[in-house]
């Protein structure tokens, strides 16, 4: 893929994610939520992978593309509803990424590689898919974890942290320990890791 095609695909992903009606305030600036998280995921991928492939970089900018269009509340409560939502959401992200990559002029082979990462296929055996999983956990810990602390009880928070930790490789865990947590965040992380 030539650079201009990749740049065009990223520009299309970003333009789509900027349509997110939800916003986040970070360091005094307001961003559309999914655009902000896509930027942070991309940044983590670049820190974790010394020479990330084009597919991995493209997947990072489209991993949760248009997430607001498939809201959780449209699915039944409970684990079954949650897992169905997550499955449908992953398919939606992969299909939206494909649509925009086709518009950018990307080759089918590249689109297939990006969808493979978005769908987390071969998670435990594909190094790029695992780098993405590490980066997703790191974005959660750095940017979403503080809010989770205010919304969930202690036991649920510990379970969430333990599950996140289990998803990461050693490289992801080392990066997680470099994040600057507040006192409460550090306390719960230490408690979860026991």
Image (cartoon, rainbow, N blue to C red):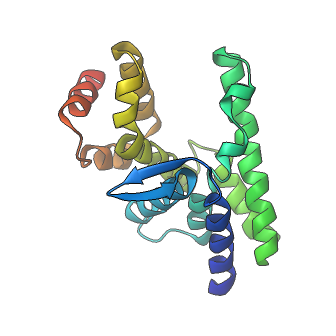
Locate residue 50 relative to residue 5 in the image: left or right. Answer: left
- Residue 106 showing in the rendered view: no
Q: Does residue 5 lie above or below 113 as drawn? A: below
Question: Would residue 142 appear left or right of 10 to someone viewing this image?
Answer: left
Tag count in the figure?
0
Looking at the image, which residue is at 69% across and 70% down? 12
Q: Going 60% across and 71% down the picture, which residue do you hit? A: 54
Q: Is residue 107 above or below residue 28?
A: below
Quarter-of-image position of residue 61: bottom right
In the image, is 82 to the left or to the right of 161? right
Q: Nearer the viewer, residue 39 or 150?
A: 150
Q: Against 166, is 177 above or below?
A: below
Say which quadrant the N terminus sits in: bottom right
103 horizontally vs 182: left or right: right
**Nearer to us in this view, 22 or 104:** 22
Q: Position of residue 151 (x, y in %)?
A: 41, 23
Query: Residue 143 in the image: x percent, y percent?
Result: 39, 45
The residue furthest left is 183
Residue under the image location 55 percent in, 56 percent down: 128
């Amino acid at each position: 893929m030539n650079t201009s095609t990749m740049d065009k695909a990223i520009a299309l992903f970003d333009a789509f994610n900027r349509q997110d009606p939800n916003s986040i305030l970070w360091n005094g600036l307001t961003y559309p939520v999914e655009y902000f998280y896509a930027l942070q995921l991309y940044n983590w991928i670049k820190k974790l992978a010394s020479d990330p492939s084009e597919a991995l970089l493209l997947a990072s900018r489209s991993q949760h593309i248009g997430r607001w269009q498939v809201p959780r509340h449209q699915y039944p409560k409970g684990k079954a509803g949650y897992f169905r939502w997550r499955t449908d959401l992953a398919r939606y992200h992969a299909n939206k990424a494909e649509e925009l990559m086709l518009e950018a002029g990307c080759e089918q082979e590249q689109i297939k590689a990006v969808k493979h990462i978005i769908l987390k296929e071969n998670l435990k055996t594909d190094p790029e898919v695992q780098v993405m999983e590490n980066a997703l956990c790191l974005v959660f810990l750095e940017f979403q974890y503080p809010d989770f602390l205010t919304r969930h009880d202690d036991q649920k928070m510990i379970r969430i942290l333990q599950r996140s930790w289990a998803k990461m490789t050693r490289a992801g865990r080392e990066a997680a320990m470099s994040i600057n947590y507040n006192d409460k965040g550090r306390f719960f992380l230490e408690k979860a890791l026991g």
